[in-house]
Amino acid sequence: MTTGTLAGLGNLALSRKEDFKTFVDAPRRTQPARLARQALLALDESARTAYERDRRTWHANLGPIKTPQLVNLHENLWDIVDSNQQDGDKAKGAVAVDAFPGLGKTTAVLAFAREFHRREIAEHGAFTAQGHERWPVCRVGLTGDKPTARRARPTQEQAA
C-alpha cells in the first residue's frame, strides 16, 4: 500500500534545480484502496499502521483541486506564456499573482510551472544544441515582508 510517490518529496527545496526536477518528474500520487470496516479490522498492526500512514499522506497532499479559479488562472497563464514568442530584444508580458495568504497561490503556480517545464522538455529536449541542460523554469521564492526603512543619522550640521 504505497501512495506512488518518491521518498522525501515533502522535503524539497524547489529553488534548487535538482529538487525542482524531482518535483517535476514525480509520479502522480495514487489513492490508497478504501477498505471496508471488516477488512480494516482484519489488518495486523503493521499493515494497519502502513494503511493509516498512506491515507494520512494521501489526504495531506490532495490537489491541486481544479476549481474554476485555478482553471481560469492556468488558462490566463498559458495565454500569456504562449504569446511570449517575441525575439529576445522585445518586451514580454509578465504575471503577478496576488491574493491573501493561504489561498493557494504557490500551489497554483507550481502546478502550472510543472506542466510548462514538462511541455518545454517534451518539445525541445532536456539539452540544448550546445549540450547544456534545458531549464525552462527557475523558481525564486519571495517573501511578503517589506524591508524596513532606515533613517539616516543626522550629520553634525543637521543636529546643531
Image: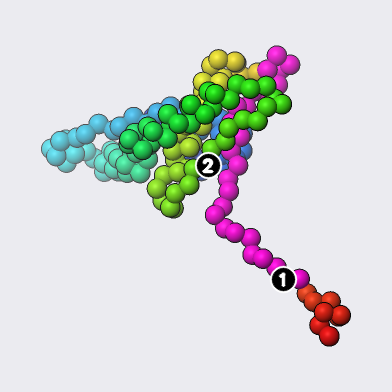
Depth order, front residue of 138/11: 138
Q: Position of residue 46 (x, y in %)?
A: 30, 41
Q: Is residue 149 magenta?
A: yes
In the image shown, does 77 or 105 lie closer to the viewer? Answer: 77
Q: Earlier in the sequence, mark 2 or mark 1?
A: 2
Please say whether residue 114 is one of the residues in the magenta stretch: no
Q: Is residue 80 left or right of residue 5?
A: right
Q: Position of residue 28 (x, y in %)?
A: 40, 28
Picture quadrant of residue 34? top left
Q: Which residues are magenta?
A: 128-152
Q: Residue at x 34, y 29 (%)?
A: 30
Quadrant for the N terminus, please. top left
* Residue 126 left/right relative to 61: right
Q: Residues within 10 Å of mark 1 (few under 14, many from 20)?
A: few
Classified by dominant secondary structure, the portion drawn in magenta counts as loop
Provide the residue designation for mark 2: 96
Q: Amino acid at mark 1?
A: Arg
Residue 160: x %, y % from top left: 84, 85
Residue 6, percent across and down? Answer: 46, 32
Outermost residue, right direction? 157
**Mark 2: few/some/many CA within 10 Å (<14, 14-19, 20+):** few
Residue 141 falls in image quadrant: top right
Mark carried by residue 121: none
Amino acid bearing label 2: Ala
Identify the residue at horizontal 55%, vertical 15% (top origin).
123
Residue position marked by numbered label 1 in the rendering: 151
Query: From what the image shows, is residue 40 above or below residue 129?
Result: below
